[in-house]
Image (cartoon, rainbow, N blue to C red):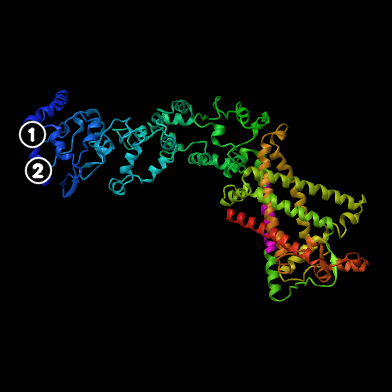
Amino acid sequence: MKTIYLKMAICALFLAGGVYLAGLPGLAARAQKGVAAPAMGNAECLACHNDPTATREVDGKTTSVYVNETTFSESVHGSNDCVSCHTDITSYPHDPAPQKASCATCHDSMATEHAASIHASTRVNGQPAASCADCHGAHEIFRQDDHRSKVNRFKIAETCAGCHTDEKVIRDYGLSPAHFIQSFRNSAHGRGMFDAGLSVSATCTDCHGAHGVKGKSDPAALTSHANLPQTCSKCHAGILNDFTKSAHGQLWLKGDARGPNCATCHNSHDIKATSLADVQKEMINQCSSCHIEQTRTYHLTFHGKATNLGLMAAAKCADCHTAHLNLPASDPLSTVAPANVVATCARCHTEASANLISFNPHPQPERREAGEATYFVSLFMKWLLLGVFGFFGLHTLLWFQRSLVAWLRREVVRHAPNDEQWVTRFVSSHRLTHVVIVMSFLGLAFTGIPLHFSDSNWGGYFTGLLGGVEVSRFFHRFWAVITFGYAVYHLYYLIRRSDFKWTWRNFFGPDSVAVRKQDLLDLYRNLRYFFYLGPRPQFDHWTYWEKFDYYAVFWGIPVIGLSGLVLWFPWFFTSFLPGWALNVAMIVHGEEALLAVGFIFTFHFFHNHLRPENFPMDTVIFTGKMTLTRFKDERPAEYERLVSEGRLGEILTDPPTPFARRISFWFGLAALLTGLVIIVAIFVSLV
């Protein structure tokens, strides 16, 4: 303070002559504003305040009173007198400290706007949330187009962030958490401004206003529900034109709170470019906030499932309904009106035909009125799944507890693989076919089941391991072709084996896979064995559960295969089939695949590998051979029949080589573990 007073004394010596010369510019400026002439000029003020070390005590705090003379002279107020703003200063030294300058003297209209804004009306300790100086600065105010200005378009966000990221300000004024500032910087507007340097990109004041900022709950706010589309239209005028004609826009025009506006779909500060994959997926979720049922049914179709897994070429809500000019199907101009549906689908699928109109992009198979074909097919598939899983689930539980008790009682015989005598169980064509079945089935399951459970985390993970939906589709179809191939080969094998001799023994003999009366007796006796009511049945060449496995494949291949072909070549099949055939095919293909995968990876694995007698791996199907001791124990009826017919020697063979055993074990174990991973993932999703 001594320094300041000393300088003031020196300045007083020159006051008589200096005040006149230095005060002339200020006199002219104040005369134009109608303000009384000052008692002193800027030179006197800056003689003290141009010192960077100049400070004074204000409310017990040491505050800098430094004014950079050069910066001030270059500012918009550089030609003004200090006292034209600090009107309460008439002499020096001046105590108490000067009052805050009133900008309203010159900027009355802006001051009026600010006075009605949320910045002025929200106060703590009698002070407005933001004053003129908080946004424009004090002595360093520059024109908006000057890069030094705090309200330059490229600095406004930084200026606003000064308060909106201050934890104390946020707490005192109850502001939104600061993360929205960073969201803005990463948004389409923010990236355009800061990354691309585009001055036309929207910044804070474009949406919220400059001096008359109001809370969005205020009806007069530029960001209120009623005003936001108009605010956005300052840049996006063409979109507003479409929006006001749309079903959404009509609700908004009526003042209906349910009517969405721009921020409903695009958010506010986190607006992203709609070309981004994540944004397109998020848009579907935005639609679901209002259109819950439509979104649910959309995800029942390939479009919805593939989109979940990242195939951005798949149709999404806006692709069919448009983004801003969405109209109800009853409107002749709507893209989903019956007369326009084919043309809409043809945007992506140039082969679309008139039959496609009956395809339901929002299927509701649980409702009969939504489509009888899909309703009854869906009902049948549900009962089929319940019947198969219910019966074999109970069958497996009973068998497991019986095997466990037998193991505890030491009734389970684990046959050593070093027996001297071996028999042929499966011929080479059976073994080769089964290896191909294992590989193709796992391939189909690994590429297809994730699509069925596309809304799960593991569905996307499995698909990502293969390189995405397009790669998965390629391999799924590849393994489908392999499946058709081994099915045709097996039919050829059956015909060749029969030698065209259609005898009773060929069809219903003990070596045949045809269902016989004996199979029903074996089932009955096995159930008695499970309940400790009788001995284990004397099984022949094929057991009843093995025949079920066999017919499940024979049933599954044409059902899954034909429905898959319809989905693979939809435009060919809808050239002569109605569009709802695609809905039916989707249900059949998905539910039958779930049935096949669930059955094979649970019951089939238990029957052949996970029983105490065989655990952890039965390699007979791969080596084709088993010990004679095991053969007599597991197939006593067949053994006795072959002995009585003198044909046992026909199946005696050499034991498999150690290499054949090892590769069979590890190949089988890898397939088993892969299947178990898939079935556990399915179980987690269902539960």
Identify the residue under disc 1: 14
Q: The residue under label 1 is which amino acid type? A: Phe
Residue 150: x and y in percent read 30, 36
Residue 657: x and y in percent read 81, 66
Identify the residue under disc 2: 6
Q: Is residue 44 above or below residue 124?
A: above
Tally the numbered discs.
2
Q: Is 87 on the left or on the right of 670, as rendered?
A: left
Q: Is residue 133 magenta?
A: no
Q: Is 502 on the left or on the right of 411, as rendered?
A: right
Find residue 284 and name its label: none
Residue 336: x and y in percent read 57, 30
Residue 36: x and y in percent read 11, 27
Specify the quadrant of the image occupied by residue 127. Answer: top left
The magenta region covers: 380-396
Q: The residue under label 2 is which amino acid type? A: Leu
Specify the quadrant of the image occupied by residue 13. Answer: top left
Q: Is residue 383 magenta?
A: yes
Q: Report whether residue 382 is seen.
A: no
